Image: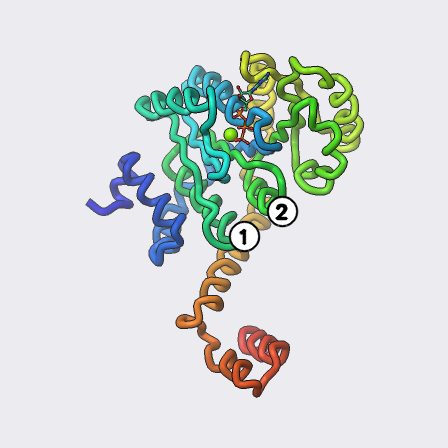
Amino acid sequence: MDLIQKFFKKDRLALSRLISLVENHDISSLEILSQIHNKTGHAFIIGITGPPGSGKSTLINELLKHILKAGKSAGIVAADPSSPFSGGSILGDRIRMQDHVMNDKVYVRSVSTRGTQGGLSRSTFDAIQLLDAFGFDFIILETVGVGQNEVDIIKYADSTLLVLVPESGDSIQTMKAGVMEIANIFIINKSDRPGSHSLRKSLMEIGHEKNIPVLMTEASRGEGIEELWNYLNQEKEKFKKTDPKKIKKQRYEETAKILVTEFEKLILKKAHNPFKKIFEEVENQKLNPYEAAQKIIKKLSV
Ligand SMILES: Nc1nc2c(ncn2[C@@H]2O[C@H](COP(=O)(O)OP(=O)(O)OP(=O)(O)O)[C@@H](O)[C@H]2O)c(=O)[nH]1
Ligand SMILES: [Mg+2]
């Protein structure tokens, strides 16, 4: 049976294989994603970002308990393989998640950072599309919130959680420009540690204008997760994927994103470059790079 047919029959192996194909930017990925596209748009996508070791995976594990208890399913994408679900007790957590995998309600996957910057966020986006079409109620996206790349990725989330720890106090000013601005809720995890109250005060000041709530958690003991779960359910209710203006904007941005990454692939692979002749003129010093770019843009604008 064809891989896509198997996927539609809820075959998890087919899902994994399709994610690998799109992740490797296989030639068939546009075709695959196009075939599954009308099944997407149902999942609630939660982005979880924050500094390394702040407790994102532990928090996800705790959230999963609530998700499962509510009879719902979740697909988890860890967008940074340099910090997979590993290390110490988290290895245990991962195994626990894999137990859930057998229940067909939880699927955990890390997405490779291979390729260009845009490529990374495209792989993640494409993986989300597949998980969404597969029918998961929640998709949880874990990224280490450090750079623009993460900001790009987390844009796909319907609700974004920024997980900080009491020690993050000093770095929030530098973080402010990036991930701080896309967070819908600030979480102070490891609130058992000193400094959590003063961080709470600073975050409340920062979040005041935009009405961003601040939540204290101790993920390793499951503290504060119930509140987080309630918050997420409220967000889910509020979040209307049917707002026509939002849909229009999203569809425009999606198409632009796909085209930009596909175009980049075309141009960077010399053999497939549709403007090979113009590039050769630059190589042979008949045109300068700016003239070449103008010429190409003119061709495309017709
Ligand atoms: N004291 C304390 N430790 C915690 C808490 N939550 C998580 N931890 C511990 O912090 C460590 C890192 O937790 P992870 O969940 O792996 O953190 P992460 O943010 O996913 O880490 P990366 O994926 O590497 O960025 C683990 O040893 C956890 O047991 C907490 O609330 N309090
Ligand atoms: Mg992690």
Q: Is residue 255 above or below residue 91?
A: below
| Residue picked out by circle 2 | 148
Which of the numbered marks, if any, corresponds to residue 108?
none
Seen at 66% across and 24% down, the residue is 165
Q: Is residue 205 above or below residue 36?
A: above
- Furthest-left residue in view? 1
Q: Secondary structure at mark 2?
A: helix
Q: Secondary structure at mark 1?
A: helix
Colouring scheme applied when the structure was drawn? rainbow
Across and down, in percent, residue 220 comes to 54, 15
Seen at 66% across and 16% down, the residue is 191
- Furthest-bottom residue in view? 286
Across and down, in percent, residue 85 comes to 45, 29
| Residue picked out by circle 1 | 117
Q: Are marks 1 and 2 in contact (CB under 8 Å)?
A: yes
- Furthest-front residue in view? 88
What crowding class fits label 1: few (fewer than 14 Cα within 10 Å), some (14-19), or many (20 or more)?
Answer: some
Residue nearest the observer in this picture, 162 or 42: 162
Q: Which of the two discs, 1 and 2, labels the residue nearer the N terminus?
A: 1
**Quadrant in the picture for residue 289:** bottom right
Going by the image, does 224 lie left or right of 93?
right
Across and down, in percent, residue 75 comes to 42, 31
Q: In 3D space, how far apart are the residues under numbered discs 1 and 2 (Cα atoms)? A: 9 Å
Going by the image, does 202 lie left or right of 225?
right
